[in-house]
Amino acid sequence: MLRTISRAAIGGYLTAIRLPVEGVLQLTRGGESMTVGLDRAEATVRGLAGQALGDEVLIDDAVRRREAADERERALRLRAEAARHAERAEERAAEGQEEADRTRVRAAEDAERQRTEAREREEAERKRAEEVARERREAASKAAARRQESIEERAKRVRLENLGTRSAALQEREEALTARDEARRLREAASKAKADRKAERS
């Protein structure tokens, strides 16, 4: 009976002490870790009181409270570790997102650079094609001019040759006419001389 009264008195005493402390912890947002510390302190006091009074119930209650405090502390540690893991995962995800964004930006810059280089190559090729076409037109024009000049030179030579041939033919014709006139004159002179001789004989 005495032990029961002592146990109840100790429990009431501890509750009377604990209530204001818990109120302070709630006001200051001390957190669950401080509550666990309070539970462990209460378990220690109950264990000491149980040993002093030889009360096995108090001792067992202290052991259970200490084990419960250990479990809560372990749970708090696991939750904190899970929160740290989650935070690190979020950080890695954020870093991954940033890297993905950087990769997309680099890919867009690379694509734009490739498009610019392709446009520049196309422009250079177009200009080169135009230059080649211009050079070919100029070469064709020069070749045509040379051919025309050659044709005209040949035509001039042919005309000169024709003129030379015509001049020679005219000269030959003139010489033939002169020879014919001379022959006629000689015939007429011979006829006249013959006639004169005949007239003299008669």
Image (spheres, rainbow, N blue to C red):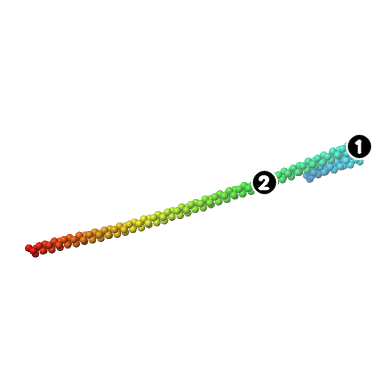
- Pointer 2: what residue? 96
Please give the name of the residue rendered at 90% of the width and 40% of the height, measured from the top-left corner. 51
Say which quarter of the image contains residue 146. bottom left
Q: Earlier in the sequence, mark 2 or mark 1?
A: 1
- Nearer the observer, 189 or 148: 189
Query: SS for tag 1?
Result: helix
The mark found on residue 3 in the picture is 1
Q: Which residue is outermost to the front? A: 201
Label 2 and label 1: CA atoms lie apart by 64 Å
Q: Nearer the viewer, mark 2 or mark 1?
A: 2
- Nearer the observer, 69 or 140: 140
Please give the name of the residue rendered at 75% of the width and 43% of the height, measured from the top-left corner. 81
Residue 27 seen from this side:
no
Amino acid type indicated by mark 2: Gly
Amino acid type indicated by mark 1: Arg
Say which quarter of the image contains residue 149. bottom left
Badge 2: how crowded within 10 Å, few (<14), some, or many (20+)?
A: few
Q: Which residue is outermost to the left? A: 202
Q: Which residue is outermost to the right? A: 2
